[in-house]
Image: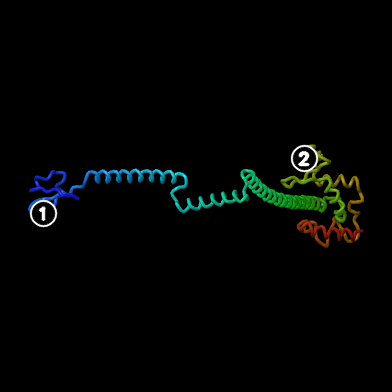
């Protein structure tokens, strides 16, 4: 590189002073030829332009594949694998894709229908059990109400005839959700003597005796009645007898009826 010599530093143009070096009693400045400066400037411009182009490409790629290079590589690998399947004939255009979608939809539908069928079976089973419990509840309600009515001191029904009476009651009484007995013939409510409320068991039993007198109590005889003619069960007074559970009252009543026979 050529050097320009200056006798003093003040003689050096201001723009070159920082590059001046003192030598041989004066100052020298290394001067780069204009062609070199132009080349250097052009190179800088080229590098800046390439930098900006690369920056724009990176921004464009980031918009397509995101900022995660690892995930982008995985995505590209997947796309390449799909492309290779197409080239190998394993995946043929939209028809194959549609077939695969249809297969998966059919599989999902089949699983759903299977689950739905299982749920329906469980619902049917639960409904059957609920119906069975409801029937048992209604039957036990009829048993309790009719048994209490038959074993009431004022009842004219022979306790030994209770099974027959219950069979008749099952076809005459229905049980509401609140546990009340309602007398019915078909879909029609059968009302009692007051014409307002459904016929109560006590009144119904009197109707049963009119239709089947043989279900009534037999006349007082040995062992079943006391000297006063009032019924006595197992030596118990009527009051003590009424305090017993229905099952025990029925058992004693049947025993007394058998003795009276």
Work out whether residue 6 or residue 84 is closer to the camera in this orientation and state it: 6
x, y percent for residue 59:
41, 44
Number of disc labels? 2
Badge 2: how crowded within 10 Å, few (<14), some, or many (20+)? few
Mark 2 vs mark 1, foreground winner is 1
**Among the two numbered marks 2 and 1 on one chain, the one whose residue lies closer to the N terminus:** 1
Q: Secondary structure at mark 1?
A: strand
Q: Residue reaching furthest top?
A: 195
- Location of the C terminus by quadrant is bottom right
Instruction: Residue at 17% x, 49% y: name it.
Output: 2
Instruction: Residue at 80% x, 37% y: name it.
Output: 195
Q: Is residue 82 left or right of residue 173?
A: left
Does 101 sit above or below residue 220?
above
Does 205 sit above or below residue 231?
above
Location of mark 2 (residue): 197
x, y percent for residue 124:
74, 50
x, y percent for residue 145:
78, 50
Work out whether residue 161 or residue 4 is closer to the camera in this orientation and state it: 4
Work out whether residue 67 or residue 226 is closer to the camera in this orientation and state it: 67
Q: Secondary structure at mark 2?
A: loop
Q: Is residue 125 left or right of residue 72?
A: right
Location of mark 1 (residue): 23
Q: Could you say which quadrant of the image residue 190 lies in?
A: top right
| CA distance for labels 2 and 1 | 136 Å
């Amino acid at each position: 590189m050529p050097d320009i010599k200056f006798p003093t530093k003040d003689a050096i143009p201001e723009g070159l002073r920082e590059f001046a070096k003192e030598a041989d009693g004066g100052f020298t400045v290394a001067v780069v030829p204009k062609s070199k400066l132009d080349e250097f400037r052009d190179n800088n411009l080229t590098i800046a332009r390439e930098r900006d182009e690369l920056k724009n490409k990176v921004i464009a790629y980031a918009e397509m594949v995101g900022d995660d290079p690892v995930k982008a590589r995985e995505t590209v690998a997947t796309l390449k694998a799909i492309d290779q399947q197409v080239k190998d004939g394993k995946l043929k255009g939209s028809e194959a894709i549609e077939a695969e979608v249809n297969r998966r939809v059919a599989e999902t539908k089949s699983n759903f229908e299977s689950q739905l069928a299982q749920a329906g079976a469980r619902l049917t089973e639960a409904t059957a059990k609920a119906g069975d419990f409801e029937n048992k509840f209604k039957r036990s309600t009829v048993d309790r109400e009719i048994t209490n009515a038959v074993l009431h001191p004022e009842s004219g029904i022979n306790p030994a005839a209770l099974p027959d009476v219950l069979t008749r009651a099952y076809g005459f009484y229905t049980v509401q959700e609140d546990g009340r007995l309602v007398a019915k013939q078909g879909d029609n409510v059968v009302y009692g003597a007051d014409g307002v409320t459904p016929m109560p068991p006590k009144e119904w039993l009197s109707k049963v005796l009119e239709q089947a007198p043989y279900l009534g109590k037999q006349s007082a005889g040995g062992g079943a009645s006391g000297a006063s003619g009032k019924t006595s069960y197992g030596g118990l007074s009527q009051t003590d007898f009424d305090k017993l559970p229905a099952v025990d009252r029925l058992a004693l009543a049947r025993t007394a009826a058998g003795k009276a026979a």
